[in-house]
Image: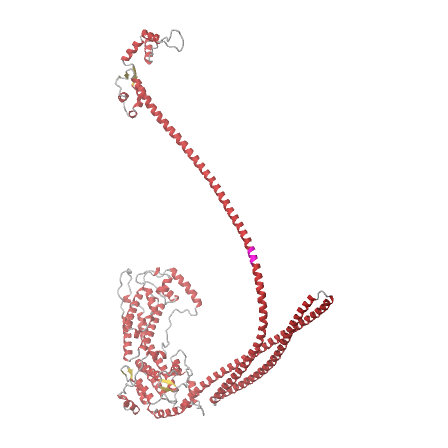
Amino acid sequence: QQLQALMETLSSTEPHYVRCVKPNSVNRPQLFENQSVLHQLRCGGVLEAVRISLAGYPTRRTYAEFVDRFGVLVPELMFGSHDERALTEAVLEKMKLDNFQLGRNKVFLRAGQIAILDVRRAEVLDNAARRIQSCFRTFAARKEFVKTKKASISLQAYCRGCFARKMYKIRRETAAAIILQKYARRLLLQRNYHEACSAALLIQSCIRGFIARRYFSAIREQKAALVIQSFWRKRKVAMLFQHYKQATIAIQCAWRQKLARRELRKLRMTANEAGALREAKNKLEKKLDDLTLRLTLERRMRAAGEETKLVEISKRDKIIETLSAECAAAKLSARSEHDKNLILQRQLDDSLREISMLRSNKILKAEEENENSNLKNIVESLSEKNSLLENELSTARKNSDDTMEKLKDVEGKCTRLQQNLDKLQEKLTNLENENHVLRQKAFSITPKPLPEKFANSTGLTNSEQKRTFETPPPTKYPSPIQHSTGSRRARLPVERHEGNHEILLSCIKENLGFKDGKPVAACIIYRCLLHWRAFESERTAIFDHVIEAINDVLKAKEADGRLPYWLSNTSALLCLLQKNLRSNGFFGTPSRRSAGGLGGKLAQLAGRGDTAQVDARYPAILFKQQLTACVEKIFGQLRDNLKKEISPLLSLCIQAPKSTRPGKAPKAPGVSAQQPSNSHWDNIVSFLNLLMDTLRENHVPSFFIRKLITQLFSFVNIQLFNSLLLRRECCTFSNGEYVKAGLSLLEKWITDVSEEFAGTSWHELNYIRQAVGFLVIHQKRKKTLEEISQDLCPSLSLRQIYRICSMYWDDKYNTQGISNEVVAAMREMVNKDTQNLASNSFLLDDDLSIPFSTEDLSIAIPAIDYADVELPESLHHYPSAQFLLTAS
């Protein structure tokens, strides 16, 4: 057991053999004897043992120890799953060692091989240590570099800040220095400038003072001369003005007196039978006498005032002359005294040595001073007198101004008196014309009152007409001298032919037709009246018979069918009267009809006489007025009949028939609907065609056709639009399409008829066209109030648009109408408008006025040549018409 323990101990340890060698024989330290030591090693067998060990494998290591020590030589194999022996073999092969043997658990190496491995291992470890050191040094150097960089950046920033602050301080100091220099330079320049200015001003003031004093002395001398000249010129001009004034006033008074006497003489001649006018004349004469007395008194007062003025002016002139003489004497004495003073001064200079002469000179000086003071007192008194005279002149001027104002007032009174005289003269002429008319009515044989329909055309009521007929003619009437003989000559043929009026009545009762577009009846009536010289007669009843016959024809049952015929005849007769008659200037007063009517311009047209051939008297002028009223009556009656006939057709056209209305199943807006039936609209078109044919057959002038069609279309527009606003079932989409289709038929008819006959008929349908266009548009909800009121319906009022929007409903596509915001805005605006409007009606009113005047007729209707119209055979048996046969 002990042996076993010893063997285990030996196997667990590695034996080392130590052999002691004596270095020297002297036994001293640090001394080595080579021969002695070599002899000891040979004798001890050490060299042999080393030689034996070198011949074998002295180095023995286990695979684990070998790999653990030299595994760093093959790092690429250390991380793999290799055996330790294989690793050992790989290390030795890599080191290119041949002297080794691999055992079962150990590797055996020859001497020196392990040293090679240790050297290679030391190189690898040294390289690794160097790399670790380089990385560490790199990290330390980089850390130090970053730290140094940050410190340098902060240091640079601080240095730059210091430098910038220093530069800013320098610039601030330089700017402050520049400002100080500027102010200093400015102060110096201002001082120099003020000094130069003060010096220049001083020099200029001295020069200007010298010039001003010299100029003032010259002006003072000129002023004295101008004062004298002004007084003389003023006196001369005043005398001329007074002379011219008196002469003009005398001439004006004489001329006005002459005119007043002339007017008074005329008034006396023209107002023999008018008692009221005589009283007015007497009053005016009294006023004129009073005014003449006043004028004479004013003239006397003016003459007395002028005489007193002349006396005062002469006195003042004398005083001024005396004062001027005294002033001249005073100036001469002053100059003489001045000369004496000069002489005395010379004498004083010569006699300074003598005391007695000085005393006498002193006494003389005192006397001269007293004389100078006296002269000064005289001059002051003269200036006071001048001021008094100037005050008196100003008062005299004021008095003359007052008298001039009084004269102007008198002249104004004279002008007003002249105006009153003119007005009275106009009244006298009016009364003269009325008396002339009354006398003609009284001289007529069988006077008959006009019908009530034509009473308005003459401007007199029935009571006034009866009164005119009952008024007896004046005993003496101063008719114009130039027309007295002519009127007597013209009266005889008219009285001869008073029984031949039957031909005119037959022309009126029968339908004579037309020849070459000219109405035969109108031409024959005009030729008869012209041949009988009825237009030049002062008293005749033939015109009343003609007008009564025309009215009787129009009152008949079948008169409605003859209205176009009589419209053509009466308009032609009126045109002949307008173009071939002229007024003789006796009736220059305006007509009593309203200025807006047709007869209101007849007097003006009768008084022009541009193309006159026959001098027309008052009956002819009255006949023209009655004929004008007849034309207006026929036109209005024809228009009303057409409105009555077309009204039932319009009531059917405003709403679509039930057969054309859409069913319950709505269609899309893009799908085209079936074209509705337009039978009612076709009836209207046929009615218009029949009307045009009737008017053309009766040769109605295109002017009347155009006006008639225009008013008829205006009536259509009013009826359709009012029905649309009053009936909710009409404000639908399908109904809008139906009315739009009918309006397109009317548009086609207007274009076919041409503008000569249709005129502006299409524009008369603006209201219904815009309303229907609003009903048939799509996407009404997207429309704004401005688009509706300005683009879609500009002619409609806001109340009318609101009415249509509130009543509209889509019966075809069931789409929505106008948005609620737009409807609310309309409602607010309508409520505001209703507070300001007097009438809240949104309907249109029918126009019943006559759309033309006499001037329009004379311009629009062409001239008619009545000479080539032959007498019909039915009138050949009348003896009074034989002149027509001979003329033809």
The type of colouring in the image is secondary structure
**Residue 712: x percent and y percent?**
33, 74
Q: From which residue to which does the magenta span run?
A: 195-200
**Residue 586: x percent and y percent?**
41, 86
Judge by depth and name the residue closer to the eye, 247 or 225. 225
Judge by depth and name the residue closer to the eye, 612 or 804. 612
Judge by depth and name the residue closer to the eye, 307 or 98. 307
- Against 674, is 865 above or below? below
Image quadrant in which you'd find residue 768: bottom left
Q: In the image as oriented, which residue stretches furthest toward the right?
A: 356
Residue 604 in magenta stretch: no
Identify the residue shown where x is 28% and y is 78%: 696
Decide whether the magenta segment is chiefly helix, strand or loop. helix
- Residue 644 seen in the current view: no
- 341 with respect to 48 (left or right): right
- Against 39, is 844 above or below? below
Image quadrant in which you'd find residue 670: bottom left
